[in-house]
Image (cartoon, grey):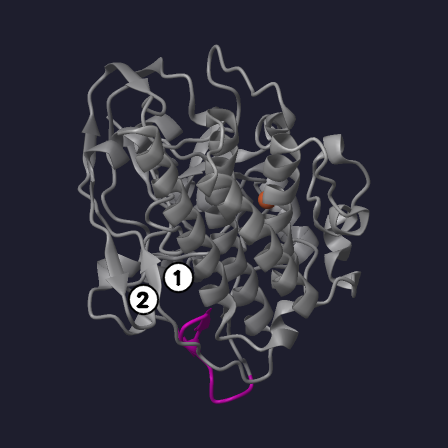
Amino acid sequence: MTKKNTTDGTLKSFETTRAVSLKIVAPFHSEELLVQPFEWVSPCKWHLGHTTWFFDQMVLSLSNKDHKVDPKINFAFNSYYEAFGQRTPRDKRSNLTSPTLVQVMDYRKSIENKVSTLLCSGASPEVERLINLGIHHEKQHQELMLQDLKSVRSLQQEPQPIEGTYSFTAMDQKPLDVSEGLYEIGAPSEGFSYDNESPKHKVYLYESKISGALVTNGEYLEFINAGGYENYSHWLSDGWAWLHQTGNYSPLYWRKQRESKHKDWQEFCLWKGWHPLELDRPVSHINYYEATAYAKWKAARLPLEAELELLNNQTSSVPIEIAQPPAMSQTKSRHDQLWQWTSSDFAAYPRYKPANDATMEYNSKFMCSQKVLRGGSYATPIDHYRPSYRNFYYPHERWMHCGIRLAYDG
Ligand SMILES: [Fe+2]
């Protein structure tokens, strides 16, 4: 491919990605884009500004020494980059009334014009690499927006289902029998990947069987009904402490209204609102502690991230467009994909070298106390997902689109 074709491809990808972010928020009232009901949720106004700030700060500043990011914008939309100075604390993002949502939309257009002009006039390979990073960063935030909007909507008195058109990852997975031996994992040299997916390296695995299906709501309900949340023997010590600190006894977005006619479990879904628990759908919004406790109760374990990379590399990934809310789609398996907890710590691969510019802060500084999730979810943009993708969260977190896949030792 010539340089010109590559740049054209980047420009198209940039424009499409920016448009998708607006498409995601389009069905929501502006008030829903401003609130932050929990410290871990970011308002969508912030996501829309932050993904734009990324291009402003990482791309435009690098390509033009005279380009200056507005200090107010930098304070509002810098997420966690120490290199770029003071910023709004993560749990206070909704406190910022300036810039307004309208100003954020104008900011988006202004930066989009500058990045498009840069690409049309011939960006250097380094600048183009950063634009591609910005594109994938925005795709990552598109999934975050959907998981944050779910949190916002779930708290409303009578949340209405939403309609929209999204792309979803479709995965038809077969069980995987792993033979004992040496395997190679890590991102291939072609195509986009984050730095933490490299370098390729060898891992030694023992004989195991990786389940083809995710654990369902019905199966998880059996765990609850068997007293799974009351029996310490299933739980890690930190998990048992989390249980007692929070008083949780079910996945997030499950509820049981004890005194009313709603005696049975209900589940909240962004597309359908609150509805009776569907027993054959994969259980979601459980944290690492809950996933581990369930696996132990089933005399199984959570997979290693290397095992899931092998599984996902053998899987056929079928991109599809669903032009209706996925819960109403006929093809169940196509919209049931969830990130899966692994027992692997989020740590550097052997001989890993983080970038030596500001993007060094993107991943490497989070390599402590977090667990890896693999597999992508129905909210992961299809052209953002790849089998080597390593998502990571703290063990207590569960508002993301995550589920459980079990592994069994051979
Ligand atoms: Fe970000």
Label 2, residues with CA under 10 Å away: few <14, some 14-19, many ≥20: few
Confirm whether the magenta stretch covers residue 143. no
Q: Is residue 409 above or below residue 334?
A: above
Asked if residue 304 shows in the view, the reply is: no
For badge 1, the amino acid type reads Leu
Quarter of the image where the C terminus is located: top left
Give percent across and percent down for residue 193.
41, 31
Q: Which residues are magenta?
A: 259-276
Q: Amino acid at mark 2?
A: Leu
Q: Residue at x 45, y 32 (%)?
A: 343
* Residue at image mark 2: 279
Q: Is residue 220 toward the left or the right of residue 399 in the image?
A: left
Marks 2 and 1 in Cβ contact (< 8 Å): yes
Foreground pick, 380 / 60: 60
Q: Position of residue 31 (x, y in %)?
A: 65, 75
Q: Is residue 284 above or below residue 125?
A: below
Cα separation, mark 2 vs mark 1, equals 8 Å
- The residue beneath circle 1 is 221
Q: Residue furthest bottom?
A: 261
Q: Secondary structure at mark 2?
A: loop
* Label located before the other in sequence (2 or 1): 1
